[in-house]
Image: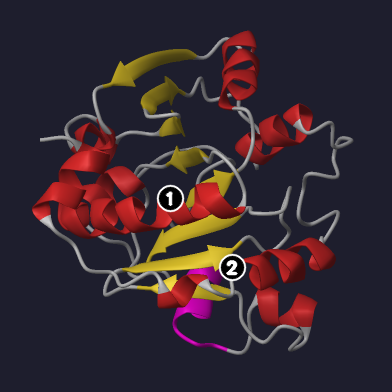
């Protein structure tokens, strides 16, 4: 059984609970008051606090999980139904999305560990990201669908997820990856000088505000309704 974790002090958890004492609130001081784009019963879509590029968004479970493998094991229909509505809007607004995630596991002893699951969506070349991950010595497995991530061993494993143009690929960490590893990889693809991809070094407020402006029509198009046909498109049988 997948267990959720207590998350006192985890910044995403504090922000999703409506707390005013969060990193986002401190950095943006009410301008804007929120980075929320859309939410369903168990999922929340946000703009990244310091976007690496316009359209850098995050999809989070509203409750605390370490990975989207765990989220899919509990809320597969909801995740995949939302993606079927959301991805065409994303493509229309920003271009082809690259989906990245560092999935963590209980007991992981790495300073790169993620404490609250989140998917990154970016209009970035996924093939270029693959080249860098493989160049770092990471091995991968290709999955038949995103839904397969809910199967063993992924809900209890650490992994790097890459989804691009319908291809789902899981990379196996070596334990040597640094904090914000995937941000550093995307930064390299975008020719962002090291370490300016680190949100603790550069806060891209203008890009967040412009990203929110560009998606301000999305809430009227995202219903959160799920049908079986929609689920099959994103996640397979």
The rendered magenta stretch, by its main secondary structure, is classed as helix
Q: Is residue 54 left or right of residue 127?
A: right
* Residue linked to disc 2: 215
Instruction: Identify the residue shown where x is 47% and y is 56%.
Output: 89
In the picture shown, does residue 127 fall above or below 75?
Answer: above
CA gap, disc 1 and disc 2: 13 Å
Q: Is residue 18 magenta?
A: yes
Instruction: Identify the residue shown where x is 57% and y is 56%.
Output: 57
Q: Is residue 43 left or right of residue 163?
A: left
In the picture shown, does residue 127 fall above or below 4?
Answer: above
Residue 5 in percent (x, y) is at 32, 62
* Residue linked to disc 1: 88
Q: Is residue 22 left or right of residue 75?
A: right
- CB under 8 Å between discs 1 and 2: no
Crowding at dot 1, Cα within 10 Å, few <14 / some 14-19 / many 20+, comes out as few
Which of pointers 1 and 2 lies earlier in the amino acid sequence?
1
Magenta segment range? Answer: 11-19
159 or 39: nearer the eye?
39
Name the colouring of the figure: secondary structure
Under circle 1, the secondary element is helix
For residue 69, which quarter of the picture?
A: top left
| Camera sees residue 188 | yes
| Camera sees residue 1 | no
Q: Is residue 231 left or right of residue 17?
A: left
Under circle 2, the secondary element is loop
Q: Is residue 122 magenta?
A: no
Quarter of the image for the C terminus: give it. top left
Residue 207 in percent (x, y) is at 78, 61
Instruction: Identify the residue shown where x is 53% and y is 41%.
Output: 97
């Amino acid at each position: 059984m997948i267990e959720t974790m207590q998350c006192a002090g985890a910044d995403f958890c504090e922000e999703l609970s409506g707390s005013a004492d969060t990193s986002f609130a401190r950095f943006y001081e009410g301008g804007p008051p929120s980075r929320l784009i859309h939410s369903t019963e168990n999922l929340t879509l946000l703009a990244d606090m310091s976007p690496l590029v316009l359209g850098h968004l995050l999809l989070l479970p509203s409750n605390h999980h370490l990975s989207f493998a765990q989220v899919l094991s509990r809320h597969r229909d909801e995740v995949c139904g939302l993606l079927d509505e959301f991805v065409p809007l994303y493509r229309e607004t920003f271009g082809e999305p690259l989906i990245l995630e560092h999935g963590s596991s209980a007991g992981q002893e790495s300073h790169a560990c993620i404490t609250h699951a989140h998917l990154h969506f970016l209009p970035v070349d996924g093939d270029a990201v693959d080249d860098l991950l493989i160049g770092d010595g990471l091995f991968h497995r290709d999955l038949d669908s995103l839904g397969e991530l809910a199967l063993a061993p992924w809900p209890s494993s650490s992994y790097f997820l890459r989804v691009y143009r319908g291809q789902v690929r899981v990379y196996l960490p070596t334990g040597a990856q640094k904090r914000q590893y995937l941000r550093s990889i995307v930064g390299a693809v975008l020719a962002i000088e090291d370490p300016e991809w680190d949100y603790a070094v550069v806060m891209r407020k203008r890009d967040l505000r412009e990203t929110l402006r560009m998606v301000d029509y999305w809430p009227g198009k995202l219903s959160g309704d799920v049908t079986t046909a929609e689920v099959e498109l994103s996640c397979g049988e």
